């Protein structure tokens, strides 16, 4: 009789080891998921700030263009030199609002920076979704393997192990190739 008991005890040890490994990978997945989520939020805030600055620059540029166009409609007068000087200054400011490579704060540069932040945000969100699905697979795998200890139904530990493998695959895809799985886009 003790031989049967030892076989059950050995089986439970293997299941416990599987549960431990699944829990370890669950911890990795949760940690990576939280980091990806934080990165996506940070990149989203950065993109929003850059687009708001872009809009402010556009408004300022439009105001100056409107003022310049209004001055251009006035008939030449005694202070024409001052008007021409003001229009030239406005033209430089309008050009600077459009592109300012030295500071990266022109509309063209702001657009590029905002799009870069959006790309980072989208990649982080894609990774986050992979990690969330991997976490779910690990959690369900842990539950199924745990249920095998109580019920003795061997299929449950195999299903838990397969879910663990699926979770590991999702974890790897999220980390190394988040764009590879088209159903997560």
Image (tube, helix red, strand yellow):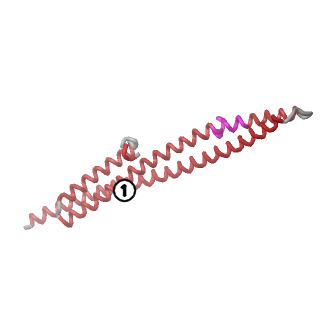
The C terminus sits in image quarter: top left
Q: With respect to residue 169, does 93 lie above or below?
A: above
Q: With respect to residue 169, does 20 lie above or below?
A: below
Q: Position of residue 42 (x, y in %)?
A: 53, 51
Magenta-highlighted residues: 94-107
Q: Position of residue 62 (x, y in %)?
A: 71, 41
Q: Position of residue 8 (x, y in %)?
A: 15, 63
Pointer 1: residues within 10 angstroms few (<14), some, or many (20+)?
A: some
Q: Nearer the viewer, residue 33 or 88?
A: 88
The residue that appears at 90% across and 33% down in the rendered structure is 77
The residue that appears at 80% across and 38% down in the rendered structure is 70
User: Is residue 97 rendered magenta in the image?
Assistant: yes
Q: Nearer the viewer, residue 146 or 72?
A: 72
Q: With respect to residue 54, does 160 lie above or below?
A: below
Residue projecting furthest to the left: 1
> Could you tell me which secondary element the residue under label 1 belongs to?
helix
Q: Which residue corresponds to mark 1?
A: 27
User: Is residue 167 rendered magenta in the image?
Assistant: no
């Amino acid at each position: 009789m003790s031989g049967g008991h030892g076989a059950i005890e050995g089986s439970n040890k293997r299941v416990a080891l599987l549960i431990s490994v699944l829990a370890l990978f669950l911890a990795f997945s949760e940690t990576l998921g939280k980091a990806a989520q934080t990165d996506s939020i940070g990149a989203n805030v950065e993109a929003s700030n850059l687009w708001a600055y872009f809009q402010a620059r556009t408004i300022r540029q439009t105001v100056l263009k409107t003022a310049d166009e209004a001055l251009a409609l006035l008939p030449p007068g005694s202070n024409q030199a001052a008007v021409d000087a003001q229009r030239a200054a406005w033209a430089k400011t309008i050009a600077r609002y459009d592109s300012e490579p030295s500071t990266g704060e022109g509309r063209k540069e702001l657009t590029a920076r905002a799009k870069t932040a959006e790309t980072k945000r989208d990649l982080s969100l894609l990774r986050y979704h992979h990690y969330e699905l991997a976490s779910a697979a690990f959690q369900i795998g842990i539950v199924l393997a745990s249920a095998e200890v109580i019920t003795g139904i061997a299929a449950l530990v195999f299903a838990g192990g397969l879910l663990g493998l699926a979770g590991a695959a999702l974890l790897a895809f999220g980390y190394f190739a988040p764009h590879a799985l088209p159903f997560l886009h």
